[in-house]
Amino acid sequence: MQGVWTPDQIRGAEQRLFARTPEPAVMRRAAYAVAGQCARMLADQTGGVAGRRVALLVGAGNNGGDALWAGAFLRRRGVGVTAVLLAPDKTHEAGLAGLRRAGGRAVAAEGANADTAGIGAEAADALERADLVIDGIVGLSARGPLRPTAAELVRRVLVPIVSVDLPSGVDPVSGAVEGPAVSADVTVTFGGLKPCHVLGTGAVHSGEVTVAGIGITEELPEPEIALLDAAEIGEEWPIPGPADDKYSTGVVGIAAGSATYPGAAVLATGAAVQATAGMVRYAGPAADEVRARWPEVVATGSVGDAGRVQAWAVGPGIGLGASGRDVLRFVLESGRPVCADADSITILADDETMWDSRDPDAPLVLTPHAGEFARLAGERPGVDRVSAAREVAARYDAFLLLKGNTTVIAAPDGRVVVNDARQAWPATAGSGDVLTGLIAALLAAGVEPLRACGHATHVHSLAAELAAHGGTGDGPRSEAGAPIGASALLAAVPHAIRAVRDAALPS
């Protein structure tokens, strides 16, 4: 897993590092990494480094100091560097002196001959002539959107932006963007990823994120959040071995759909078939529709007739009436791991007595979207989705998968895994039914619930991306992509599994 650390964790690690390495030396390490990234971008985009122009947007404090030192390193490589100072009286003194010694310039953001927006002529000229801009406006201690002058400067930038540590204006903890903020092409962060790089709109504003080592790795505690990468998922995805049979690779039960919503049954069942399950047993009113689409499935009319399974998926399309409640109660009493979605979540939220049916020793996965989450929690998740998911997971002693463009998965013990899709192709009716089937299949195969949710979510979002861009071998791949339905997403699941498994192969 790749770790994500909170600003407080990073600051604590930095303080421990400063006890053995002077802070100015650490700052120059960080700045050197920023300068290196900028030089590579200049070379790629303009064909060279020397003779190009870079503008620095410099706020108060150490973040601005990092930008100034990066400008000094670039100036020594022949780059014309102008620092636009948003707080001239609070500018990092050593960084500014270093830039000037290297031959760089510094101008005030609100200098002489200001235009109607209050931006000085020299600052405006520096941005207009720049080939690249470094964002060093605010750092990890900042909260809230950009102030008007900074926002106006950022609005005028028409060239690539490299942010120092995080895009200014993005909340460091939640990734929320609640006003003007930098939208970076690349963010160079130090020591480890922060929540703003992987959560919410902040993930999009961060662009490509590069982690630069500054010597704090051994000082870092356990990460607050974990990310699963494709290679790790591919290595752990259940695949039949020489000694396996249809029973040993996971028998999953699907309790979904109704006469009104047969599609939910077809999609959830199909996801389990496509994912990994050695056998899929469907139980419900849509048995005929399921058999017609998936003849390999053992389909019966009720959960009582389904036979033995190793995990259950329950909820999509079962309805909120007595029959749906009976189905959910049977599944919760089964003693098997359960992935509860859609109508199951509403029933559990509306009827507290339903929780009495649950086997306390069997893992329970809840997969709400924001509206369903509000039924469980009493309010929508808000901007701090990690804390919200953690609180509800602990309250119900369940694994809580909070759906969204950035999906947050919390275990009852506080562990959190995040999947940042960075695209919204799965935002289509029936997509959640597919995810439910994938999770249940992995649970039946014996994958630990937190990892089952993380693996399934990653493959689900990847399948949607492949389907949208035509990356499933059915035609040429499109860079732009096109909207898809849940059926197309489901059909792309095997392609997504192959992709993560290929990523796990030795290079």
Image: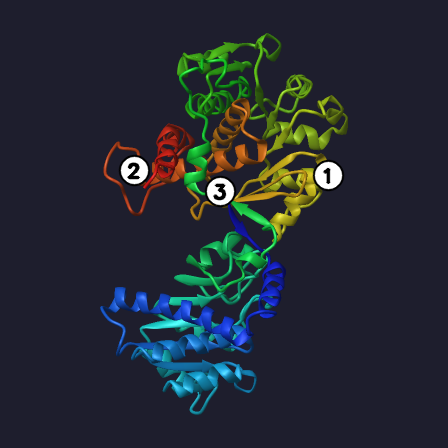
- Label 2 vs label 3, nearer the camera: 3
Disc 2, SS = loop
Q: CA distance from mark 2 to mark 1?
A: 42 Å
| Residue drawn at 51 percent across, 60 percent down | 191
- Which residue, given by chain and number where applicable, does mark 1 sit on? 395
- Which residue, given by chain and number where applicable, does mark 3 sit on? 228
Residue 118 visible somewhere in the drawing:
no
Please determine whether, in this image, residue 276 is positioned above or below residue 410.
above
| Residue drawn at 38 percent across, 71 percent down | 35
| Residue drawn at 48 percent across, 10 percent down | 298
Disc 3, SS = loop
Please determine whether, in this image, residue 129 is positioned above or below residue 121.
above
Residue 90 visible somewhere in the drawing:
yes
- Which residue, given by chain and number where applicable, does mark 2 sit on? 470
The residue type indicated by label 1 comes to Arg
Residue 184 as seen in the image, left or right of residue 199: left
**Image location (x, y in percent) of residue 407:** 53, 43
**Image location (x, y in percent) of residue 106:** 43, 86
Q: CA distance from mark 1 to mark 3?
A: 25 Å
Please determine whether, in this image, residue 138 is positioned above or below residue 318.
below
**Image location (x, y in percent) of residue 232:** 45, 39
Contact, CB < 8 Å: mark 2 with mark 1? no
The residue type indicated by label 2 comes to Gly
- Choose the circle earlier in sequence order: 1 or 3: 3
Disc 1, SS = helix
Report the residue that reaches farthest toward the front: 20
